[in-house]
Image (cartoon, rainbow, N blue to C red):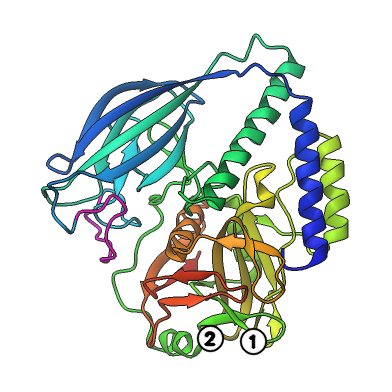
Amino acid sequence: MKNPSHRKLAVLFFALSSVALMTSPQSAAQSPSEYAFSISSSQPWTDTGVDLSASDTLAFTAETKSGSADSCSVAGTKSASSEKLPLQDAPAGVLIARISENGTPQLVGTSGSLRVDNAGHLFLGVNGSTVSDCAFAVKVEIVHAQNSAQQPAAAKENVSVKEQLSSAAKVWLQGQFGGSSKTNGTSANGTQTSALSGNTASGSATPANTKLASSPLDGGLQTHIDDLPRRVHDHVGNPGDMVNFVIVGSQEKVQGALDAAAWHLADVDSKEAGLKAIMNTYEKKDYLEMPMSHLYLFDRMQDFGYEQAQAYAVVASRHHFRMWKAPFTWKDETVWEGAGTHDIGFEKDIRTGHLTHKIDPDVDVERENIAQSLGKSGKIKSTTYYLPPNPLQDAKNASGGGYHSDGRLLVVFLQ
């Protein structure tokens, strides 16, 4: 949203959202319940005693309890993941959840949201392989979905619109005025919400056919990656977002994996996007392909832009990344370099004084969202993390927003 056409498109989206909201019923189809727990790493999992129904939505907030070691953090540590961790792709020590005794662990962190696919029972734990003196105070708000089978079709449809608008408003407010909250498909602090089920999960961070590579990168590929640019830039050369992932695979493989991981190819033309948004609204379809601004690498704009968001919130809050084909191949496979960030609201662009998207400054969280969402595609051979020479760890994007990182690149090898 760095040009007038994008701003006009945002206004259009908000207008469409307002119309949809005014035509929605005033009665809600859900009722919340609140719980508080003390979760200790002295045991692998804590049974909360809370039963869950299909379509329930869980919103978490958590903090480290006083008396815990200085190294304890609900968000986990920056140390490398271990194969012994319950959730291998997540930081050690981070708060995690699962929906049954043998269910797949899911990332929670300091705040997050999870949507339940099938009825189950809530367990909370710490992503660790050893016992420590860490303890977390966790609050959970559960929105219980009422039986919608008896509602008329029009009422269910309007309720769905209202719920999406309400959720979108919360996403925007949390991002705009501080605070992070993961939501399904549009988490405000950077991870895609997982859909929990008994033993499998949509968005699972560690599917059976995905593993963290324990050996160093091939020397030839490592040399190429070392020579890649660390940042993208705008049309006049102002340095911007950091490059934080590399994907190895043909264009066909990349697009297949992203489609399977529920990433949407962004529209390119803003005028056509506006018409598409109107038609989708008229046809009661979600519009999740909002155009993104042009950024540059290898002296050209992105080859592709992809995004994840929930309906209506896409204007202000979305996970998104841009990809460029690298000027080299590895073992006859195409190499793609990408920069991923999470839009969480709006702020002033220091170049123009106009509004532009505000990104979550912890860009590593969006890197993990990319890793976890691709993990569910079933098309990943392996992933690893690589710390290049002179890593980028603290910078500002082209519009003036600050961000920070541990400097590692996610490297994904497709099947």
What residue span does the magenta drawing correspond to? 72-85
Q: Is residue 402 above or below residue 342?
A: below
Q: Residue at x 56, y 52 (%)?
A: 176
In the foreground, 113 or 298: 113
Tell me the SS state at disc 2.
loop
Camera-side residue of 52 and 182: 182
Q: Residues within 10 Å of mark 1 (few under 14, many from 20)?
A: some
Q: Does the stretch in magenta take in 33?
A: no
Q: Is residue 121 left or right of residue 244?
A: left
Is 78 included in the stretch rendered in magenta? yes
- Report crowding for label 2: few under 14, some 14 to 19, many 20 or more residues within 10 A (C-alpha): few
Q: Which residue is mark 1?
A: 298
Q: Are marks 2 and 1 in contact (CB under 8 Å)?
A: yes
Q: In the rendered image, which residue does mark 2 sit on?
A: 229
User: What's the magenta bit mostly, secondary-structure-wise?
Assistant: loop
Give the amino acid at mark 1. Answer: Phe
* Residue 332 in view of the camera: no
Q: Is residue 357 visible?
A: yes
**Looking at the picture, how far across and down is residue 195, in whole percent?**
48, 37
